[in-house]
Amino acid sequence: MHHIIPRAKIYLQILVLTAICGLAACETAPPVQEMSDARQAIAVAREAGAADLAAFHLRAAEKYLASAEQKLGERAYNQARRDAKQAKMKALDALRASAHKSGDVDN
């Protein structure tokens, strides 16, 4: 019985260490998916006429994307990820505003 408790403790420590390393890897990996999502959302907003119908939101999305690209180049991945997510959200705002102003909303 003495040997079971220390083994369980070692397994638990290994599990915790593995989880921490996994989380650290996520934080230090480039935000490839987030950058792609932001670029695609901006492209869709442009196609929907956001440059004319929701220029404020589209410009904000583009500024966040530019900031994300700069942070990516600096290997500041957490900040790049955050800015890419903001770029996507602003692009979606531009898309919604474009749809509303053009009358393409389903209400």
Image: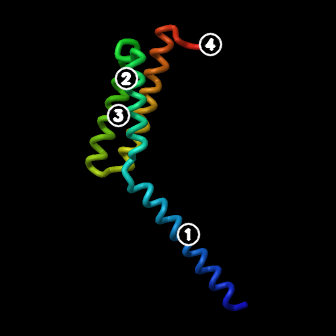
Label 4–label 1 contact, CB within 8 A: no
Amino acid type of disc 4? Asn
Reply above or below: 19 against 39: below
Q: Distance between the Cα atoms at labels 1 and 3?
A: 35 Å
Disc on res. 64 = 3
Name which of mark 3 and mark 2 comes first in the sequence. 2
Q: Which mark is residue 99?
A: none
Q: CA distance from mark 4 to mark 2?
A: 23 Å
Mark 3, other Cα within 10 Å: few <14 / some 14–19 / many ≥20: many
Q: Position of residue 29 (x, y in %)?
A: 39, 54
Dot 1 and dot 3 residues touching (CB under 8 Å): no
Residue name at image x 37 percent, y 20 percent? 46
- Dot placed on the residue nearer the N-terminal end, 4 or 1: 1
Q: Earlier in the sequence, mark 3 or mark 4?
A: 3
Q: Residue 95 at x, y = what percent? A: 46, 21
Q: Are marks 3 and 4 in contact (CB under 8 Å)?
A: no
Do labels 1 and 2 touch, CB within 8 Å?
A: no
Q: Which quadrant of the rendered structure holds the N terminus?
A: bottom right
Residue carrying label 2:
58
Instruction: Give the Cα distance between marks 3 and 4.
Output: 30 Å
Q: What whole-number distance in Å separates the C-alpha atoms at marks 1 and 2?
A: 43 Å
Q: In which quarter of the view is residue 37 placed?
A: top left
Q: Secondary structure at mark 1?
A: helix
Where disc 3 sits, the SS reads helix
- Check disc 1 and report the residue beneath it: 16
Crowding at dot 2, Cα within 10 Å, few <14 / some 14-19 / many 20+, comes out as many
Q: Amino acid at mark 3?
A: Tyr
| Residue bearing mark 4 | 107
**Residue furthest toward the top?**
103
